[in-house]
Image (cartoon, rainbow, N blue to C red):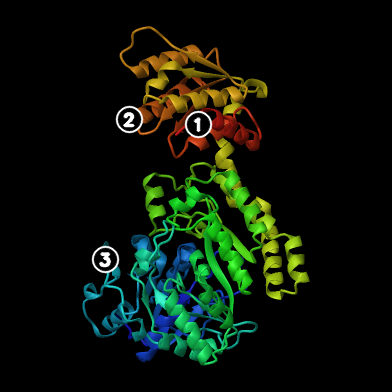
Amino acid sequence: MSRPINKVLFIEPRAPRPHIFSRVAIPRLGPVLLGTILQRQGMEVKVIIEEISAPDYRTLDFQPDLVCISSITSTAPRAYELADFYRGQGLPVIMGGAHPSFIVRESLDHADYVICGEGDEALPELVAILNNGGDVSAVQNLAYLEGGEMRQNPWRPFLENLDDLPIPNYEVVHDWNARRGRRFVSIATSRGCPFNCRFCGVIKLFGRNYRFNSVDRVLEEIRQNGVKAHHVFFCDDNFTANRERIKELCQRMLQEKLKIEWSAQVRVEAAKDEELMQLMAKTGCYCVFVGLESINPATLKLYNKSQTVENIKDCVLNFHRHGIRVHGMFVFGSEEDHYQVIRDTVKFSRELDLDSLQYLILTPIPGTPVYQELEAQNRIFCHDWSHYDGHHAVFQPRQLTPYELQWETIRAMKKFYSWPSVLKRLVARDWFYVKMKAYGRILMWQSRWGKSPHVLHLKERLFARVRQLRQWLPGGAQIQRVGIPADIWNFGPWEKTPREFLLRFLERLGVEVVQEAVTDKAENAMQLVQTEITRLQEKADLILLPFWQGLDDARQKIKDLHQQVTEETMTRLLALDFNRESFYNACMELGLCFRKRLHDIRRIYFQTLSEVGAPV
């Protein structure tokens, strides 16, 4: 280390694009807390939260000796950009947060060090070593490069006594006192989560063991930070995981006459406790953020959500009965979701009269079970981290095309954030939600109603191969006859139901299916298929090569055959993978060869489903 570290700059990068809470800047607690820890050790600290104030770093009057950048997955590209800027000035850079904790090697391409998981102890230890000398291999939770090779030290046990941490000092935040309008502060009363939702990375990051601050400590933090703010956000991942503890906290707030407006993240079951509801309302709970997730029972089971649709209804009604507003969050795109689930969810949430909501697209965030599964199945097609914000389809769903998932989610948001919904809040003089709903509507308009580059890219992915096939037809003729080599069914072999489903699906599309079988002797099944393809060339407008799941060797042979025949003869060959994860998408792509409207193809698919049964 060429220069001593006396001044440390922390940066929380801004979101890649506006979202429903863009005008409600709630600072994440991590950089503020870590900055406070170093400040107490004599460092001069500044924390820049770009959602609050994003300065020009080239002219910033604070000249740091060390830069620490926190990142979630969607802000990773911005974090990398900032890290590269400061490393270009010769400054050491440390990255931390949820994304670098699990995408370590990539992060080290931009930072000198990565702190994985909790940094409360690791960061001051590392700074001390950088200042005074020592062995960085002794710092648990730390990753770094040594001779071009990544070194990742073991993770330390999670901090048990959270009261040992200082109360965050928001005065270290850049332009904190210059802010106009409502000021929000975050207060954490716990870490960890006893539940295990498959799309959430909290357990891997903070553990399943539920650790919490004492009630006395939380009250002191409210006195120091909460009463000075317009609104307190209790940023626990599950504020009411221990309901008796929250009851005690609320009772003490009433006894000490601590008057604050607050909100928190809770689960559905919190609304079952009448005493808790009353105490939350009395202490100033303005809104709760509830992971409603889905109205599809199969999806709720898949997500490991121990709740029912009736529980969801009761939850919203109970909170409303106590004057507490509800922000609901639904997640679309599970293995069990299809387009009708999304449309039914929109109808359900409007009938439920949720105050605000987000329809989110299932996103495989690194560190979650969903990410591990989809990555192993090679179903993630987009690795632009800025799209990992819950508003972009980045993987291949099972019962939706990525384009449908994206478009149906946009359509759902458009229906909820409508001008009539704004007018309804205006009549009720609910000014905060008038502004929020109006802003939501404006955001939908700014997104160009589904004509963003990402949406257009998804549409192009779906239609690209079909356009190529149609270009091969003379004079723009339509594909009317589909040839299928009879021996292709032996690669698998295909089971009866999916084979019957596919043939019935083609029949409903109005397609004539021509199957060609040969009785000549052949060295192997692939040679038979090649002979059948040759005979089909004069009989069919398109030759379909469907291959079945779990047959990697046969799949590769068919792909090689597809490329060879297409290049040599210009035969219109369509090879489609009909495995469990891609069957629906393969049917949609196939259907677009004969019908122009995806809606019609989808209707035929589900009609066939009702007749034949599930193909996989």
Q: Amino acid at mark 1?
A: Gly
Q: Residue at left 78%, top 70%?
A: 427
Q: Give the percent coordinates (x, y) of residue 162.
A: 35, 81
Q: Quadrant of the N terminus?
A: bottom left
Packing grade of label 3 (10 A; few <14, some 14-19, many >=20) is many
Q: Give the percent coordinates (x, y) of residue 190.
A: 40, 76
Q: Amino acid at mark 3?
A: Gln
State the residue position of label 3. 152
Measured Cα–Cα span from mark 1 to mark 2: 28 Å
Residue 47 appears in the figure: yes
Camera-nearest label, 1 or 3? 1
Per the image, label 2 sits on a secondary structure element best described as helix
State the residue lying farthest toward the front: 274
Q: Quadrant of the C terminus?
A: top left
* Discs 1, 3 touching: Cβ within 8 Å: no
**In this picture, is 454 found above or below 111?**
above
- Viewer-nearest residue: 418 or 80: 418
Q: Residue at left 30%, top 13%?
A: 523
- Viewer-nearest residue: 603 or 428: 428
Camera-nearest label, 1 or 2? 1
State the residue position of label 2. 553
State the residue position of label 1. 613
Q: Earlier in the sequence, mark 1 or mark 2?
A: 2
